[in-house]
Image: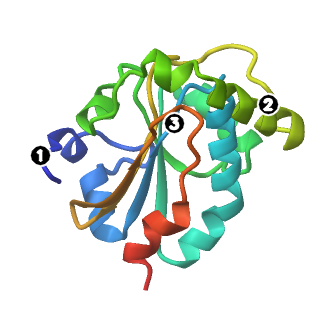
Amino acid sequence: MQNITIAKTRKTNRGRTLDEASFEQPVLLVFLRHFGCIFCREAMKDIGKKKDEWEAKNINVILVHMSDNETAEKYFKKYGIPNIEYISDPSCDLYASFGLTKGTASQLFVLKNWIRGFEVTVIKGTPIGIRQIGDGLQMPGIFLLSEGIIKDSFLHASASDRPDYESIISCCVV
């Protein structure tokens, strides 16, 4: 998997490595921000709405989070994805192995993020997080893995970027 050796050893809650999972079917690997982040909550809401459709297209969604599993499962249930496959990575080693870095001030604390945050909370009704659960500086990212290879990716330029999931999975949809 393009020099990402941790993908051959780190296991999901279902006991599979990312490498193994990617040989069974394409994997939409979503690295989340901390659970207190409004954009993390928006991502889980988006995934909750599309997960069944993606599974019908033979795409497996695996989330990576920075929390303990019990806390993560409560959030996944709340956002309509209670049985999703996931990896807990509180040390952010897996994030780093995929090239995901800590955010800079211009990625995290800019007017664009405040405006999008207002839109997501006030206009779209996604609840604001009460507390930060995970590294508040960690940037998210999305990777499409198939047969041990990264086929596509989306690296957030700012915390508020919203990926086009359909575009990312399009390379592996039959």
Question: Where is residue 6 drawn, in percent x and y?
Answer: 20, 38
Say which amino acid is labelled 3: Leu
- Disc nearer the start of the sequence (1/3): 1
Q: Secondary structure at mark 3?
A: loop
CA separation, marks 1 and 3?
Answer: 22 Å
The residue singled out by tag 3 in the image is 32
Query: Which residue is found at the position 42% from the left and 18% from the top?
Result: 104
Image side of residue 92 versus residue 1, left or right: right
* In this rendering, the label closer to the viewer, 3 or 2: 2
CA separation, marks 3 and 2?
Answer: 20 Å
Question: Where is residue 30 drawn, in percent x and y?
Answer: 47, 47
Query: Which residue is found at the position 71% from the left and 48% from the top?
Result: 45
The tag on residue 3 is 1
Q: From what the image shows, is residue 132 above or below residue 33?
A: above
The tag on residue 118 is 2
Say which amino acid is labelled 2: Phe
Say which amino acid is labelled 1: Asn
Picture mark count: 3
Query: Which residue is found at the position 75% from the left and 16% from the top?
Result: 130
